[in-house]
Image (spheres, rainbow, N blue to C red):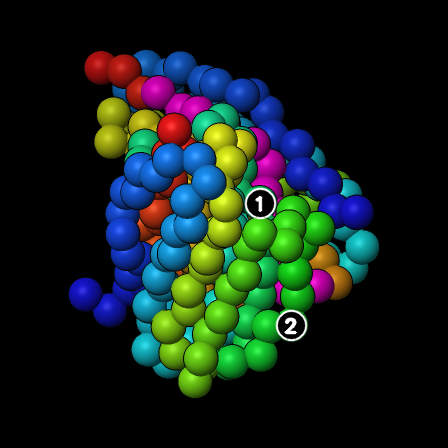
């Protein structure tokens, strides 16, 4: 069964203080690792898809990387508007996504 | 707005009542998924449609839950004889044929009293 573990559960940063979120996974035949952002009371918003080890994707202050066992979401010089829960998910042999429990990020002035 | 839409956004019901939720996909997307999310957890997969065919169902989907996607367009998720444990956010997601990315709607928040 596919499994995703995210750490830390919560992270508090000062504005401009860069950090990384971790996503460890076990899956039979990875067919995609996905990062989403979720604001309170809203549906997840798609950020990135990574398919193979060594792949990297960037968007504004966010960069996602992938190894054979884990993915990192690097946040460079975060701003308060980056505050949200960041979810990691994997797709294995079926059609469903298996999600982790997320990292709740708070960026303070 | 060309994104995934869900209706209603909020539903409060009494235990034992039936409820039905609707999802309207992005127009060119033929794949549709239902997930359930409780507080502090990630979304959990419930069921998957390709066009009008329901191809995959989770063990979480008890016989009180039924989903349909007539004509391969909008989908409905019905919960019969609701229980307090059904209280959650019900999320719909859709994807096209060119990629695996799933795009989520805003969700329906169900509260069973």
Of A29 and B8, the residue lying toward us: B8
Which residue is farthest front? B16
Indicate the chain on which mark 2 is placed: B
Q: Which residues are magenta?
A: A94-106
Local SS, label 1? strand
Compute the Cα span from label 1 to label 2: 17 Å
Local SS, label 2? strand
Which residue is farthest left? B1
Residue A19 picture location, percent across and down: 47, 24
Residue B44 picture location, percent across and down: 58, 45
Of B58 and B67, the residue lying toward us: B67
Residue B68 picture location, percent across and down: 49, 70
- Magenta-colored stretch includes residue A25: no
* Residue plotted at (64% across, 50% down): B62
**Dot 2 surroundings within 10 Å: few (below 14), some, or many (20 or more)?**
few
Give the image quarter of residue A61.
Answer: top left
Q: Which residue is mark 1?
A: B44
Of B18 and B48, the residue lying toward us: B18
Please give left or right for residue A34 compared with residue A62 in the image.
right
Disc on the earlier residue, 1 or 2: 1
Q: Which residue is mark 2?
A: B55
Please give left or right for residue A93 compared with residue A103 in the image.
right
Residue A42 picture location, percent across and down: 32, 42
Q: Is residue B81 visible?
A: yes
Q: Is residue A38 visible?
A: no
* Residue plotted at (27% across, 52% down): B8
């Amino acid at each position: 069964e596919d499994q995703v573990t995210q750490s830390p559960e919560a992270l508090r940063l000062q504005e401009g203080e860069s950090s990384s979120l971790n996503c460890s996974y076990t899956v039979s035949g990875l067919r995609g690792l996905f990062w989403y952002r979720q604001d309170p009371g809203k549906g997840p918003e798609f950020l990135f898809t990574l398919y193979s080890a060594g792949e990297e994707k960037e968007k504004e202050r966010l960069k996602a990387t992938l190894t054979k066992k884990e993915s990192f979401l690097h946040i460079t010089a975060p701003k308060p508007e980056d505050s949200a829960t960041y979810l990691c998910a994997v797709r294995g042999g079926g059609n469903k996504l298996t999600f982790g429990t997320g990292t709740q990020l708070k960026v303070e002035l | 707005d060309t994104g995934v839409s869900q209706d209603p956004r909020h539903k409060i019901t009494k235990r034992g009542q039936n409820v039905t939720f609707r999802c309207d996909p992005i127009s060119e997307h033929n794949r549709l998924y239902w997930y359930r999310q409780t507080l502090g957890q990630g979304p959990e997969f419930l069921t998957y449609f390709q066009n009008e065919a329901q191809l995959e169902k989770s063990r979480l989907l008890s016989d009180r839950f039924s989903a349909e996607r007539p004509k391969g367009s909008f989908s409905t998720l019905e919960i019969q004889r609701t229980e307090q444990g059904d209280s959650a956010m019900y999320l719909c997601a859709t994807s096209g044929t060119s990629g695996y990315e799933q795009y989520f709607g805003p969700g329906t928040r169900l509260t069973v009293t």
